[in-house]
Image (cartoon, rainbow, N blue to C red):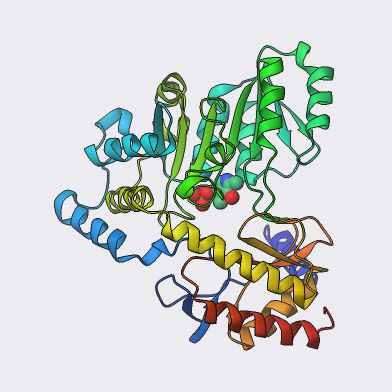
Amino acid sequence: MPKTDWIKQEIEALQNTGLYNHIRTINSPQGAWLDVDGKRVLNFCSNNYLGLANHPALVAAAKKSLDEMGVGPGAVRSIAGTMSLHVELEKRLAQFKGVEAAITFQSGFTANLATIPALVGRDDVIFSDKLNHASIIDGCRLSGAKIIAYEHNDVKSLQEQIQANLSQFRRALIVTDGVFSMDGDIAPLPDIYEVAREYDILLMVDDAHGEGVLGNGGRGIVDHFGLHGKVDVEVGTMSKAFGVMGGIVAGSAVIIDWLRQRGRPFLFSSAMTVPDAAACLAAVNMLEDSTQLVDKLWDNAKYFKAEMKTLGFNTGVTETPITPVMLGEAPLAQQFSRELFDAGVFAMALGFPTVPQGKARIRVMISAAHAKADLDQGLEAFKSVGKKLGVI
Ligand SMILES: *Cc1c(COP(=O)(O)O)cnc(C)c1O
């Protein structure tokens, strides 16, 4: 029997249960409208919250940097030196976030893989929200620390787990998503902070979906709750609202310095590319100059979510522009997505293991790039497909 037969069987099982990933090809820049598989469709699923992925200011900054500095960073920063562009970006990010220091990584995923194992190890314990992002889970596993999951957004459960376990370990870390990416709900960070303070435990939040979205002008969840100086580590990404690619860790100077010494994706993997760093720098400048894009994002999101509710869709517990449309079983969600595509709307179905079994959904991502007419057109498509499939 060929060695890979088991993989074929696994793939067939995914296909039979509606869980196989069909990946569509995009032939246009990111924006409110896309050319997907040769069809012009309304974009309802990218994380390009502010429409920056193809913004002229970011494109111009990237082009200029290419002419002046070339394409690649050459090597790992600690081994072959770091480019002034990356240093400047980190300085500007720290100012924007109101923290002592910031460090960038290749992605949000590697930022988590770098940060968690640098802060805790074998003799330590991590208290982790049950619905935390896969990159947090992987960072926790890599650290070798004992992982104790508390009930989602449940501060009482967190406290109980701390009381029952803390004394058996050397050090501890509490880690939570800021905005939960599949449901769009927000972590109760002020209450979590009170617990972290009471037990003197390091507190880390992964604000990937809050960066550029929450807080004044998109300064993130710590700004949103007025918790400046109280959250030890803020992880973020520049791959979503910033429209580019790259991870951020923001916090005290001592923690950021430690990540330069012990963050493995920093020490063993090269830095962001030159045009990525330049485009991110342009994004920070734009966000500092004006709150207009962030305001537009929230106006659009509020409008869309209210209209979806009026139509009778279940959009779960979202408090952010992430709009899950709960459908239940994965095959229904996949069919819904296909019908939407035929109606000119691109919104992918999400099933297990991205979301729990039986909680398949379409996740609509609203952005500042959408005009009101776009949202109305999308709502019309949801209405007709929802009626056709008996969802509303
Ligand atoms: C998207 C996401 C990441 C990964 O960010 P990338 O920059 O795309 O690697 C990490 N954490 C959370 C919570 C996310 O939603």
Say above or below: 232 vs 180.
Answer: above
Q: Judge left or right: residue 7 versus residue 31.
A: right
Is residue 49 among the parts visible in the rendering? no
Q: Closest to the observer: 254 or 94?
A: 94
Is residue 178 among the parts visible in the rendering? yes
What residue appears at the point 29 percent right and 66 percent down from the top-left corner? 56
Q: Position of residue 358 (x, y in %)?
A: 84, 62
**Residue 174: quarter of image:** top right
Q: Closest to the observer: 156 or 12?
A: 156
Q: Closest to the observer: 315 or 170?
A: 315
Q: Position of residue 58 (x, y in %)?
A: 31, 59
Q: Residue furthest left?
A: 68
Q: Position of residue 386 (x, y in %)?
A: 77, 82
Where the N terminus falls, by quadrant? bottom right
**Residue 191: quarter of image:** top right
Q: Closest to the observer: 192 or 83?
A: 192
What residue appears at the point 46 percent right and 69 percent down from the top-left corner? 369
Q: Judge left or right: residue 233 versus residue 361.
A: left
Total residue callouts: 0
What residue appears at the point 49 percent right and 85 percent down from the top-left corner? 40
What residue appears at the point 63 percent right and 55 percent down from the top-left corner? 320
Q: Position of residue 145 (x, y in %)?
A: 67, 24
Say above or below: 49 vs 16.
Answer: above
Say above or below: 117 vs 344.
Answer: above
Where the C terminus falls, by quadrant? bottom right
Q: Judge left or right: residue 377 versus residue 3.
A: left
